Image (cartoon, rainbow, N blue to C red):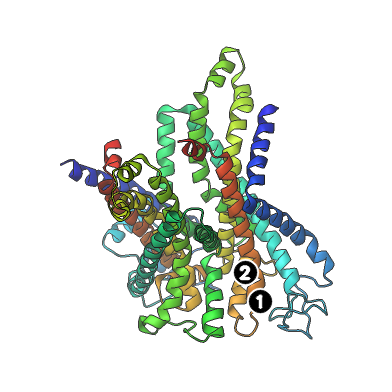
Amino acid sequence: MSNFRFVIGRFLGAIPTLLILICLAFLLVKSAPGGPFDFERSLPEEVEANLRAAYNLDDPVYLQLFKYIGDLLQGDFGPSFQYRDYTVTELIATGFPVSLRLGTAAIFLALIFGSIIGSVAALNQNSKLDYSVMFFGMIGISIPNFVMAPLLVLFFSIGLKALPAGGYNGGDFYHMVLPVVSLALPQMAYIARLTRGSMIEVLSSNFVRTAKAQGLPTRSILLKHVLKPTLLPVVSYLGPATAAIITGSVVVEQIFGLPGLGRYFVQGALNRDYTLVMGVVVFYGCLIILFNLIVDTLYGFIDPRIKQNR
Amino acid sequence: MKNTNSLLNDAWAALSKNKAALISAATMVLMVLMVLIGPFFSPYAIDETDWYKIAAPPTLFDGHIFGTDDLGRDLFVRTMYGGRISLMVGLVATMVSVMIGVTYGAVAGFMGGRVDALMMRFVDVLYAMPFLFFVILLMVFFGRSIFLIFVAIGAVNWLDIARIVRGQTLNIKGKEFVDAARSGGVSTIKIIMKHIVPNLLGVVVVYVALTVPQVILVESFLSFLGLGVQEPMTSWGALVNQGARQMESSPWMLIFPAVFLATTLFCFNFIGDGLRDALDPKDRTRGND
């Protein structure tokens, strides 16, 4: 029962956050100077009046907000101002699968390699291997993916001619390698450093010393006692990592010419396509909040101490 | 008097032991000097086209030591000017976020009780927001001025500092020396200035060092997407963007700004890490366990 209440409580707690996100995005758009119908040639007054009426732009702002939220609940993000024949919902539906594919691959790559590299460094603390992992980890964190991506292209595509420099091509393996790697590298580096620090702390804790004193084999100490507490901070970092991967994908899709949601977002931003930009912000925002929520809830189950503190 | 001294001493002692941080600090000093003075040694202006050397590779002999870009502009001068913008954004936007964060956190910490709970709940809610997207929204709707970059980045980066400062303030407020000062009849303002702020300083310094690279990164990110600094001014992010487009024919256009940007982020991260190891009380207690 308490589990059920815990989960429900977490989900209810996210609702105000979602509402604030939507209101913020909406009010920002409404307070933007210039309207969606300010073309170079001004429209005849009657036409503009009709357009404004068609998009409910003459209603008070709070009514428009309510209507927007109501539409959102039905999955309707409104029409796009740039891509005339598409609704924002359709554009999201076309772009998101590509971004999802890219992001999922990147996050798994970062998680698996990051935690393995971090653990190896921690088990060889203060060795040359450890120092070089820490050093390269710092480089990985410091080099943003919009610098990393062109450098990788320069090396692997233009220099070695081993991998394609861009394009989606239906998402085949070779075309996805460079985008996924350049998206994953900073997160991999961060997770490696996180895992290392956490494992060093766990290794020096009392229960591990006890287990060693009891003469348990190293392998079973590591697997049964060390692994789980080591990965706790990594699990809680999954939320921020997702957010970083999503923002990173905006750039990576731009560089490699992948037809993902991030690309639409940048195009929309450069073309002042208000509804599209707002739609993507709300969509990604909800996704990040939802993912944080899931990670939080999972964390409560992995580490029962958290639940009791609530 | 002694408070500020001991803080500086602490910081210096910590940094001088940490080789990576020390080298990083020296590199950053060099970088700042180079960016400030460098352009004076070049005969070219930032937006001047050398018609005889369009997209010329780097050479040591005729002035264009970093080569020129696809419009014949000297890349060395552009990289230095770009560095000025990037570093300035890093500094100013960090100041904005520190001012907001310290005030917010200190007020929440001092007030305590319900006000504190409410203020911190608000920070929790903001934490869940996809901030970079909001910065982009701001840039799209309100034009792409440098001033807005400062404010927008600063305004969204204060959450960490606010949390840390609040925690510290709560902690210090309950310390014996504050009680002692209070019972000795020292005024509230004096207690804040003499006893609380100097103790916050260490934490703030650490977070300044860690925030600067974040801010530079955000600005480069915006400029890379074409939403940040506009021509003829430039920043490292904008230069990397232009370089990435020309990298097949003129890779130097990508490599020089990329190296400068990466080195700066790298050094600041190392300095921040070193300072945190030394000054952050949370880490210190962990070390004593």
Of all chains, the one bearing label 2 is B
Of B116 and B195, nearer the camera is: B195
Determine crowd level at label 2: few under 14, some 14-19, many 20+ residues with C-alpha closer than 10 A: many
On the question of residue A273 being in view, the answer is: no
- Residue type indicated by callout 1: Met
Q: Residue at x 69, y 65 (%)?
A: B82
Rendered view: B26 above or below B184: below
Which image quadrant is residue B116 in?
Answer: top left
Q: Mark 2 — residue?
A: B258
Chain letter, disc 1 residue: B
Name the residue carrying label 1.
B253
Q: Position of residue B268 (x, y in %)?
A: 61, 54
Which of pointers 2 and 1 lies earlier in the amino acid sequence?
Answer: 1
Considering only vertical position in the picture, is A242 above or below A97?
A: above
Q: Position of residue A133 (x, y in %)?
A: 50, 61
Residue B239, image quadrant = bottom right
The amino acid marked with disc number 2 is: Ala
The answer to whether residue A224 is above or below residue A263 is: above
**Quarter that holds the N terminus of chain B:** top right
Task: Pick the residue in front: B158 or A179.
Answer: A179
- Look at 66% across and 32% down and name the residue there: B6
